Amino acid sequence: MESFGARLHRAVAERGPLCVGIDPHPGLLARWGLSDDVEGLERFSRTVVEALGDQVAVVKPQSAFFERFGSRGVGILESTIRQLRNSGALVLLDVKRGDIGSTVAAYASAYLDPSSPLYVDAVTASPYLGVGSLAPMFELAAANGGGVFVLALTSNPEGASVQRAVAADGRTVAQTVIDEISQLNLGAEPLGSFGLVVGATIGGTGHDLSAVHGPLLAPGLGAQGATAADLRTVFGSAVPSVLPSYSREVLHAGPDVAALRAAAERVLGECRAALAGA
């Protein structure tokens, strides 16, 4: 099976370097004139798929905003995943799972096994029980052509106390995560399938991302404060591997389909220019 890294590399070449989140929180549903219930959730998700599924390289549903409606919300998430995949977009499910042993193996089966109704191209994961605890995710992803994006340097202020803590060998916790993910991507062509999440709002990181050879998801763009121009500051020489991620900046243009497509095209143009150094 073709690797996630190879499929992502092709999708970005064909559609451009852009990930758009599906984050149907109550305020956004209200902004669209939708009710904060499963009917509003379904209409919201269907509209985003119609507008962006055939345009954007990667779409990132945030699982929590579906889960809050219980089984019916999860059913809509399953349907949204199928619709996105049928439209040609890669689906990155934002779940930030992390556990040990049989539990992390079950999470892997839920999202990275093709027989699962929640099967997606890639997931986000938390490494703070140790990167090695995520091995079942890495193994199942590799076997099925999937990907895993591991949290490394996040934008929230609370993250620094853990991520920038210094280990006995002098590296920060974040750098140890970066280095371990880099090892997983050794020899992969044209791009590794194991990526990192690095917030676009954090400025110069002081961390070495040059050897990752995998995708670098950059959330925090747009409404959260970062601009495309900030990407070169944050990622430096690793900027060719960056996958910029927007949510509200694009979604606020809805519910008009044409307006959503135009918003995505606008931010994609800004990202192309920034990543090219223009």
Image (cartoon, rainbow, N blue to C red):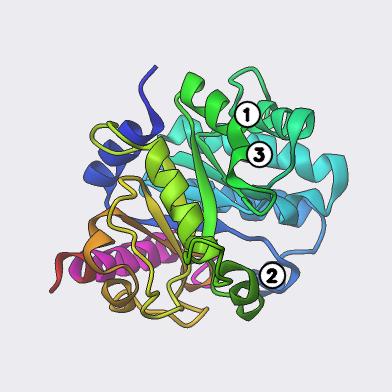
- The secondary structure that dominates the magenta segment is helix
Q: Are marks 2 and 1 in contact (CB under 8 Å)?
A: no
Q: Residue at x 64, y 32 (%)?
A: 111
The residue carrying mark 3 is 133
- 3 and 2 marks in contact (CB < 8 Å): no
State which mark lies toward you, 1 or 3: 3
Q: Residue furthest left?
A: 278
| Secondary structure of residue under mark 3 | helix
Residue 87 vs 69, above or below: the answer is above
For the image, the number of numbered tags is: 3
The amino acid marked with disc number 2 is Gly
The residue nearer to you, when weighing 116 against 148, is: 148
Give x and y (percent) for residue 101.
75, 31
Give the spatial CA distance, label 1 vs label 3.
Answer: 8 Å
Residues packed near mark 2 inside 10 Å, few (<14), some (14 to 19) or many (20 plus): few
Q: Secondary structure at mark 1?
A: helix
Kindly identify which residue carries mark 2.
Answer: 33
Which quarter of the image is occupied by the C terminus? bottom left
Residue 260 magenta: yes
| Residue 119, above or below 202 | above
- Asked if residue 35 is positioned above or below residue 157 in the image, the reply reads above
C-alpha gap between disc 2 and disc 1: 42 Å
58 relative position to 172: left or right? left
Callout 1–callout 3 Cβ contact below 8 Å: no
Q: Residue furthest right?
A: 70
- Please state which amino acid type lies under the numbered disc 3: Ser
**Residue that badge 1 annotates:** 136
Three-letter code, disc 1? Pro
Q: Which residues are magenta?
A: 251-273
**Does residue 150 appear left or right of residue 228 in this picture?**
right
Crowd around label 3: few <14 · some 14–19 · many ≥20 (10 Å): some
